[in-house]
Amino acid sequence: MFGYVPAGAAITLNTPTKVLVKSQVDALTGSPKSMLSRMYAAGKSTLPNGVGAEFYLVGMPEPSGGTKAKRLIKFMAKPIAGTLGTNTSAAQGVVCTALIGMRGASFVISQGDSFASIATKAKAALDLVENLPCTVTITGGDTLELEDIHAGEAGNDMPISVTFDSDDAGVAASCGTLTIGGGPAAANGVLTVKATVKSAAIAYLSADTATVIATKAVTALNGDAYSVSAAQAAVATPVVTLFYRAARVVNRLSAAAVGGGITATLASGVLGVGTPTITSALAALSADTQAYKSIVPFWTDTTNAGTLAAGVVSQDQSPIEKDQRVFFGTSLSLVDAQAANLADATSPKLTTSALFAVMQEPGSTVPAYEQAARVGAIVAAEDYQGRNFNGRVLRGNEYAPLGVPHRADRQTPDEENLAITALFLAPIGVNEDDEVAIVRSSTTYKAKGSLDQKLEKWSCMLQVHLYRNEIKAAFRKLFKEKSIKRYGKPRTDASVDAQDVKDAIYRLMIQWDDRDLFDGAEELRGAIQAGVVVSPTRIDVSLPFRPLADLDQLAVEGIIS
């Protein structure tokens, strides 16, 4: 797992370090708040009793000159029917729960508490959370500023929820404001407000004033199941105040106006800027004789994703054959994932290899890199290499909590299918038992036809890698210190011929078939080829790899008779 650590952390930077327990990880990474510590906790949380896989962590410095992401929670009067409230304190006692990436706290608001007092209580409660992914400061008396622990654009994936256990206290939490500028509009246009998953496209007309457009935005955001609600002052202005909705995460807020000279300015914090420099870490990974069954990066920028992909693909080739695979993570909505199109945007393209997966969970309650860590750990811990991971449940614990995306933020089956077939993503969704689960264990590989379609699933390369490893191990044992008899038959155990090699391969195929890791060894015996072709000191071998295919669909047709 790759992850940021704060300056001065004890871990050797850019180098894989084997870890055993959480206390060791927290000490090495500088804090349980660090990205790398939280990724480790997430990976361990999804394994039975936290065991089954060995964990190696690569601590990385934050990007030089990077900016830390910031988000806001402002306590204020609860709006009524799209109009800002006017009370200055809590009308009655209420419990507020604030969660940042599912880590947070609940605290009691008393009757008569001012909004500044509420902010002070919230900060005190959040400061006690040892693995909170941000620092908390108070600005303006009533507003919490949440600053990501690390600099960089990875901090822009910060799901936040603020919920009150009663609406009667007259207290709400705002995530920021949207100010409409310009106007009257010189032409028709569209204001787009994105929050978490859904986007509100708000049409405005030529001659609409900024205030009229702001009012349309309030009406639109309150008229559907968006993750934010909105309000204006009683005497309407061009300023729209955005609010957290109960039991909803707010993430990736943005706003833009197109047409008629109208502008849209969102004041909801600061975007994180900066991507990691991965050169040293990849050099160490390439030089390492250890192969890592699962590699989990936290970045999804196309440059670094492509650089990592090139290194992993090159090390998968003979004679290195490291047998590694990479699990990226994204919480982008389908629309934004289409715009990013990560699998097709890198160089080399991820669609040309079955060694990669991009886990996608819109509306995720945790950063996407934590979900990627869970998936990577599950695959690394799996003993049966033909496993179909469709439907595998992802779990959390007290160190790495995991919530279920709100129903309004989940993808439809059609959207999941589009994510799989058009964007080569591996969606994470919610199953019938209301559990977070892998929808389809898809790789990023784009099949050219039915013959290579198995490569679109994780199990294919897991089985292929097993074949390669067991062939190498068997050959080292069987043919060590042997000589080649090219024209005659071997008379002693000091020599071998091509037929001996073919027989050894066939025995392995039968063993794989017996373990349900090969499909039909007996009928393929004649397809095994071996001979001295290139050099008198080398026997070339060709054999069919026929891994089992995942069962993805059952097509049932009922016939009335």
Image (tube, rainbow, N blue to C red):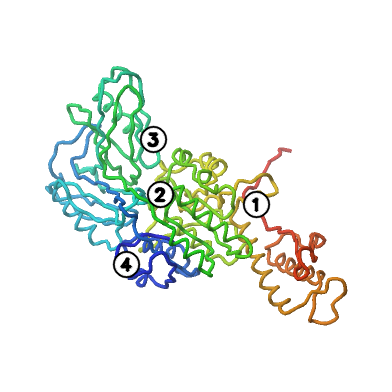
From this view, report whether residue 535 is shown above or below residue 206. below
State which tag comes first along the sequence, 3 or 1.
3
In this view, the residue in front, 162 or 441, is: 441
Q: Which residue is mark 4?
A: 9
Residue farthest toward the front in the current orientation of the protein: 535
Q: Badge 3, how many Cα within 10 Å: few under 14, some, many 20+? A: some
> Which label number is shown at residue 454?
1
Q: How many angstroms separate mark 2 from mark 3 (CA)?
A: 16 Å
Mark 1 neighbour density, 10 Å: few (under 14) some (14–19) many (20 or more): many
- Asked whether residue 149 appears in the rendered view, the answer is yes
Q: Which residue is mark 2?
A: 364
Task: State the CA–CA distance, disc 1 to disc 4.
Answer: 43 Å
**Could you tell me how many numbered marks the image carries?**
4
| Dot 2 crowding, Cα within 10 Å, few <14, some 14–19, many 20+ | many
The residue under label 3 is which amino acid type?
Ser
Q: Earlier in the sequence, mark 4 or mark 2?
A: 4
Q: Where on the picture, by quarter, is residue 281?
A: bottom left
Residue on which the image places disc 3: 199
Between circles 1 and 2, the one closer to the viewer is: 1
